[in-house]
Amino acid sequence: MRRWRALPLVLALLPGCTEPTASPRDETEAGSVSAQEASTWEPCDLTPVSLGPALADSDLDAREPVHAGGRLFFVAGDDTTGHALWVSSGTQGTGTFKVKDFLPGPTGMPPTQLIRVGERVFFAAEDDAHGRELWTSDGTVSGTHMVMDVWSGPTGSFPGSFFEHQGRLYFAAGDEAHGRELWTSDGTASGTVLVADIEPGPEGTNPDRLARGGDGSLYFIAQVQMFYTAVMRLSSGAAPVELMRMSSEGAVLGGPTAAGRRVYFVMGDLHGHNVHLMVTDGGPPLLIADFASTGEMRALGGKLYFAASTDMEGEDVELWRSDGTRKGTWRVKDIRTGAGGSSPGELTVLGSHLYFSADDGPHGREPWVSDGTVAGTRLVTDLEPGAAGSFPERLTALQGNLFFSAQTSKRGREAWMSKGTTGVTVPLDDVAAGALDAWPRGFVRSGWDLAFTAVNGQGTRRLWAVPLRPEGRCPTSAR
């Protein structure tokens, strides 16, 4: 066992449906955690501890654990016997509890798309009587219920595209009268309403890719009259406004992504080989630049950072930045010189720097960092020396640390953490011993813990946690 600063780990695993209650200790620590949000934290121990039952190792993007109300929410079970919503207080507090069982419904799909809104979570779940609908939970049995039967009866409205905005949930859902349109909810049936019937009648517009603009408006993509794709803007107290319409064959390929007061998106070209980077400040979108291809986008310091290529084949993908003007849009650095590009991915902001994975050739795919300048764009560390690379994935910034998954020949794919520009990068202890792969993902800070899911040496995915505290707050008796 290796320790960052040692802490005895105590965990109560309490199966069943007993309703958890918060202890005075939980409430006191929750307040302390809230007061420390902006500080840099450190793990008190590098040995992950398993929490709760086995998790399904499929459809993982829709089942990531979520922290809300002082607890970590997650879904466990299998497609045969059904799934259940669980909560955990992690390595401290009252333990890990089952909140509610969900038997296989009409589609057999488990609860998915957990998202925090205030102190609650929303998610999509189903039963035989209502089909797949919107549910919510505060982590207790009595506080877990279906919000509203949007499409009455067993058909189900299939809520999706969940997004938190101004303390409410916005989502796409369908009903018989309006088709699939944009809805919003405060967690009550009376507070769950249709935002607008953008395309009147049962066809619907299938709102998707919601993003919050710097002006407080909500931007999203909608399908209009089946033949067009539109960029929409929703301001408080107003109806959605269409900013731009294009043929659905050209489509919107990426975004919207907000940076400062501008919102960027990528538009396809029906008659050419390029894609167009567009920008809007709430008015008609303007063309910034053409590219052969574009990739991930992330905002940092009011600028947009993104992966893009200008060569005809679209292979020389490198890191670019834009301030929303043609002159202010340029390649940050040619990380991999020559015809091939470094293909930046996993773009993640930590403090004033952008972290990402890239392949420069000699070092293979490894973690990189950039401050937006050529000199400030560099390799963080070469975890797997040589051209093979460690292929870092799931980069997540939490409390001044970068957590990620990486593969090395001796340790397999395991969880790592980095202090970033300070150059301190260390692995967490193996979940799957030796060269076996643990495939860690879903990194999230929950209360006093870093939590994530990973596969153990027996091939079972579980929830894991290590204690995480503000610097200097790990127990002195265990150091």
Image (spheres, rainbow, N blue to C red):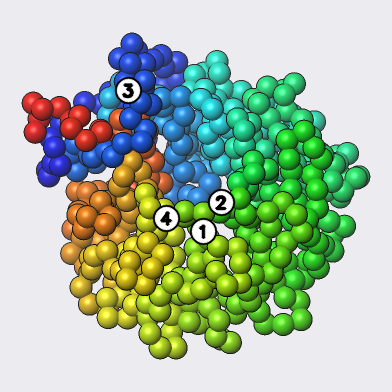
Expressed as whole percent of the image width and height from the top left, the position of residue 306 reads 51, 65
The span from disc 4 to disc 3 (Cα, nearest Å) is 27 Å
Front disc: 3 or 1: 1
Q: CA distance from mark 3 to mark 2?
A: 31 Å
Q: Is disc 1 placed on a helix, strand or loop?
A: strand
Instruction: Tell me if I can see residue 113 in this picture.
Output: yes
Give the answer, above or below, for where 29 lies relative to 390: above
Q: Which residue is mark 2?
A: 260
Q: Amino acid at mark 4?
A: Thr
Q: Earlier in the sequence, mark 3 or mark 1?
A: 3
> For numbered disc 4, what is the local secondary structure?
strand
Tell me, yes or no, whether the two marked residues, 3 and 1, touch with CB atoms within 8 Å.
no
The residues bearing labels 4 and 1 have C-alpha atoms spaced at a distance of 14 Å
Q: Indicate which disc residue 348 carries.
A: 4
Marks 2 and 1 in Cβ contact (< 8 Å): yes
Numbered badge on residue 266: none
User: CA separation, marks 3 and 1?
Assistant: 33 Å
The residue wearing badge 3 is 32
